[in-house]
Image (tube, rainbow, N blue to C red):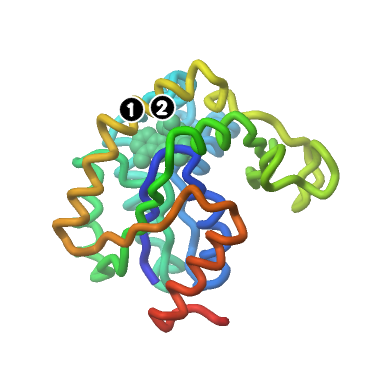
């Protein structure tokens, strides 16, 4: 299964991509995670991305486009992938079309997580991420077993610098201006499937599972 998860920051793309990637046996490709990893490792790419990410701006297209093209051409992506946080601009979407055409791996679907502003702000401000493995939690909706500690690897949970209130506003403006137009782009390609992003984790997970069972691609 080859999917794009589209929607504003805080829509739940990352959380559901993690689950879907297991259920559908597809690799989870999150550009945000890849960039944060480069930042942690202080690679030239990470250092270039840092200033943009801190301000909630988009990292330049050429940087992310090359990063995703390289990732999708690795052998494991041939079994299927879930793109989370990419594409985010019209140029990224066009280049993705070209990359997938060249790899003969067309998209099956674009899931648009339609989410209200109120829910987005509540989710982003309460989100906590593992400082080591990047797994995502929420102080109210998706709590770790032990407060402040990652269930998966036992490391400390932290707030992402760009989840602070002053940066959230900018990220949402950037989304409206640069990413929201992709809804129409994929609608025109007849590829868009709307999902109710306001739902809590469990009901939305059940909704997605049903959707893919209908498509005949997930286990019950
Ligand atoms: P995310 O984890 O998807 O919310 O991404 C965190 C930050 O990484 C964004 O605010 C951008 O600065 C950067 N980023 C992630 N994906 C992209 C992308 N496709 N294009 C440009 N910048 C990106």
Q: Is residue 35 visible?
A: no
Q: Is residue 186 visible?
A: yes
Q: Is mark 1 within 8 Å of ligand 1?
A: yes
Residue position for label 2 = 171
Marks 1 and 2: in contact by CB < 8 Å?
yes
Q: What mark, if any, has residue 201 been given in the picture?
A: none
Q: Quadrant of residue 60?
A: top left
Please tell me whether mark 1 sits on a helix, a strand or a loop. Answer: helix
The one nearer the camera, 57 or 141, is 141
Q: Quadrant of residue 206?
A: bottom right
The one nearer the camera, 52 or 192, is 192
The location of residue 126, given as percent across then percent down, is 64, 33
Q: Is residue 123 above or below residue 93?
A: above
Residue at 50%, 39% (x, y): give it.
Answer: 10
Quarter of the render that holds ligand 1: top left
The location of residue 70, given as percent across then percent down, is 36, 52
Residue position for label 1 = 174
């Amino acid at each position: 299964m080859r999917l794009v998860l589209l929607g504003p920051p805080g829509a739940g793309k990352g959380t559901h991509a993690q689950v879907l990637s297991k259920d559908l046996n597809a690799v989870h490709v999150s550009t945000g995670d890849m960039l944060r990893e480069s930042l942690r490792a202080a690679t030239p790419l990470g250092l270039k991305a840092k200033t943009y990410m801190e301000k909630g701006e988009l990292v330049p297209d050429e940087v992310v486009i090359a990063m995703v093209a390289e990732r999708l051409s690795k052998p494991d992506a041939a079994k299927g992938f879930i793109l989370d946080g990419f594409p985010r601009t019209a140029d990224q979407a066009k280049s993705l079309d070209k990359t997938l055409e060249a790899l003969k791996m067309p998209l099956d679907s674009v899931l648009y997580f339609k989410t209200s502003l109120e829910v987005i702000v509540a989710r982003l401000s309460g989100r906590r991420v593992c400082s080591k493995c990047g797994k995502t939690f929420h102080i109210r909706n998706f709590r770790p077993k032990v407060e402040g500690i990652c269930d998966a690897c036992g490391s400390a949970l932290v707030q992402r610098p760009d989840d602070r209130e002053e940066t959230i506003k900018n990220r949402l403006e950037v989304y409206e201006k640069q990413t929201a137009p992709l809804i129409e782009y994929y609608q025109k390609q007849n590829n868009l499937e709307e999902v109710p992003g306001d739902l809590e984790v469990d009901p939305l997970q059940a909704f997605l599972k049903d959707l893919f069972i209908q498509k005949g691609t997930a286990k019950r």
